[in-house]
Image (cartoon, grey):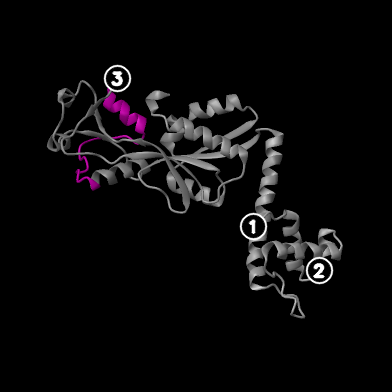
Amino acid sequence: MDVSTDYLKTFVAVSECQSFSLAASRVHKSQGAISTQIAKLEEQARIQLIDRSQRNFKLTEAGEVFLVFARETLARAEEIGKLFDQLNSGIKGEVKLGATRSVGIYVLPDIMSAIAHEFPRLKLSLFTQSRVPTYEQLKKGELDLAVVLSDSSPAGLVTKPLRSEPLCFVVSPRHLLAAKKSVSLKELNSTPFAIGIKGNEFSDMVDSILERKGIPQPTEGITISNLQGRKEAARAGVGLKKLLVKGVQLDDTYLMLVEPARKSANPNVELVKSILEKQLKKPADEK
């Protein structure tokens, strides 16, 4: 069934005006043209949309259902029209991207720089913060997309995991444990840690994963709020060595692309989204 959007506009006008003559004035057609279009719609649908047995204007039950469809279709057609206008005017405008802090600082800058170089008329704005305010801004339409590091998907948003980011224990190669093929949980628990501060979202997520695995929280060591600072404390200037802990397999976290439940028809958003998906699916060492 090929339904003209012009016919849909006529049907919506008649339904909302509850009058053929008033609808004719709204859509700038003659009353006869209005009647002909409604009749053709009913002929295509093979069902009556307007109850002509009533003195006052009234839609049939099928007409009420069709009115919802017609309004949704016209709204979508308007979005498509705006999309064509944007495509014709070229890639320009602003895309607002949210990110958790570690992602915004260490993962996205190179990708954003490449996008800006290829599409100089496109403005990219990056907002780095914790997950909760990022999710709220997505729901309110204040952000177009977000990239987060998390071990769970948020409710009420569309989430696409792009790649896993395994958690592990690391030490400096000069540490006594570095020479061992694997270490016991007892040895791990007796080793001072460089840990994050309480209330830091990433640190709290790691603490939650350790708790699920039955690993006691470190009681000795130093507290550093910044993730890079903790890496440098472990590195001690000579690189990092991954520890294999017997009987312990930490849960993976994931780099996730998050967007509002009602996806944007903005071609700029779709462009940035496709580039992020392509680039962030690659393991970090392949870039």
Q: Residue at position x 58%, y 34% from top?
A: 124
Q: Which disc is residue 20 wearing?
A: 2
Which comes before the other along the chain, label 1 or label 2? 2
Q: Which region of the structure is painted magenta?
A: 212-236
Which comes before the other along the chain, label 1 or label 3? 1
The answer to whether residue 255 is left or right of residue 241 is right
Q: Secondary structure under badge 2?
A: helix
Position of 180 relative to 226 (above/below): above
Position of 3 relative to 280 (above/below): below
| Residue 20 picture location, percent across and down | 81, 68
Q: Residues within 10 Å of mark 3 (few under 14, many from 20)?
A: few
Position of 195 relative to 31 (above/below): above
Instruction: Give how far apart the Cα atoms at labels 1 and 3 are.
Output: 61 Å
Q: Which residue bears the numbered disc 3?
A: 237
Which comes before the other along the chain, label 3 or label 2? 2
Q: Nearer the viewer, residue 22 or 109?
A: 22
Q: Nearer the viewer, residue 187 or 52?
A: 52
Q: Nearer the viewer, residue 142 or 285?
A: 285
Instruction: Give how far apart the Cα atoms at labels 3 and 2 are.
Output: 81 Å
Res. 274 in view: yes
Is 34 inside the magenta-drawn segment?
A: no
Farthest-out residue, top: 238
Circle 1: residue type? Glu
Q: Residue at position x 61%, y 45% from top?
A: 265
Q: Quadrant of residue 8?
A: bottom right
Q: Secondary structure under badge 1?
A: helix
Asked whether the beta carbons under mark 1 and mark 3 sit within 8 Å of each other, the answer is no
Give the total of numbered labels. 3
The answer to whether residue 88 is left or right of residue 202 is right
| Residue 193 picture location, percent across and down | 23, 34
Q: Which residue bears the numbered disc 1?
A: 72
Q: Residues within 10 Å of mark 2 (few under 14, many from 20)?
A: many
